[in-house]
Image: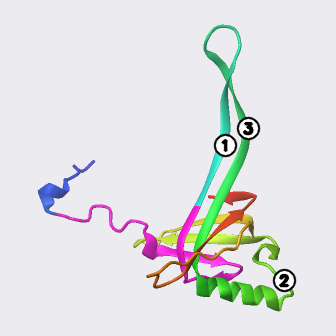
Amino acid sequence: MPAIQSAVDTQTVLINGRAYDWASLKLRLLGQLVLGVTAVSYEETQEKVNNYGAGTLPVSRGLGKIEPKASLTLEMKELERIMASAKAQGLQRLQDIPPFPVVVAYLNEANVVVTHTLNNCEFTNNKREVKSGDTQIEVELELILSHITW
């Protein structure tokens, strides 16, 4: 096996190439590529508990439900575009839009794509918050979803 040289030895700044970053993110919402997304957050947690029997140490572990959470922050112009489309379909509120997937893809310099799908999403809120000095209006939207395909 060849020896691994350190960056200090070779004066190489980039050892592993480009990282996944915000610039590599592509987000599809309601079947459309969304350029006005300014933040995305998603996670899942699973309840895990120790089960006790004889003695003072756990004898097994129990698994509970998996709870996914997600939110998107969109520029108001993107949100108004979504609302206009929903109204054209006879829907009155953002929360009336039927379940949809959100696809988040990341691409690195080696053209390796990592895709995560937020499944069966629905909006749970619709708000606006604006203050003096804002140069763009961003809207944070909470999602309810069934699961994440990692």
In the picture, the disc for residue 65 is none
Residue to which mark 3 is pinned:
64
Label 2 and label 1: CA atoms lie apart by 34 Å
Is residue 107 on the magenta stretch?
no
Which label lies toward us, 3 or 2?
2
Which residue type carries mark 3?
A: Gly
Residue at left 68%, top 54%? 68
Which residue type carries mark 1?
A: Gln
The front one of 113 and 131 is: 131
Span shown in magenta = 12-41
Which mark sits nearer the N-terminus, 3 or 1? 1
Residue to which mark 1 is pinned:
46
Image coordinates for residue 81, horizontal then vertical, percent:
67, 89
The front one of 55 and 5 is: 55
Which mark sits nearer the N-terminus, 3 or 2? 3
Residue at left 84%, top 83%? 91
The front one of 83 and 146 is: 83
Residue at left 42%, top 69%? 21
Q: Splitting the image into 4 quarters, where does residue 73 fall?
A: bottom right
Label 3 and label 2: CA atoms lie apart by 36 Å
Is 88 displayed left or right of 13 in the figure? right
Q: Splitting the image into 4 quarters, where does residue 93 fall?
A: bottom right
Which quadrant, please, contains the C terminus? Answer: bottom right
Q: In the structure shown, which secondary structural element does the residue marked by tag 3 occupy?
A: strand
Which label lies toward us, 2 or 1?
2
Residue to which mark 2 is pinned:
91
Labels 3 & 1 near each other (Cβ < 8 A): yes
The front one of 40 and 79 is: 79
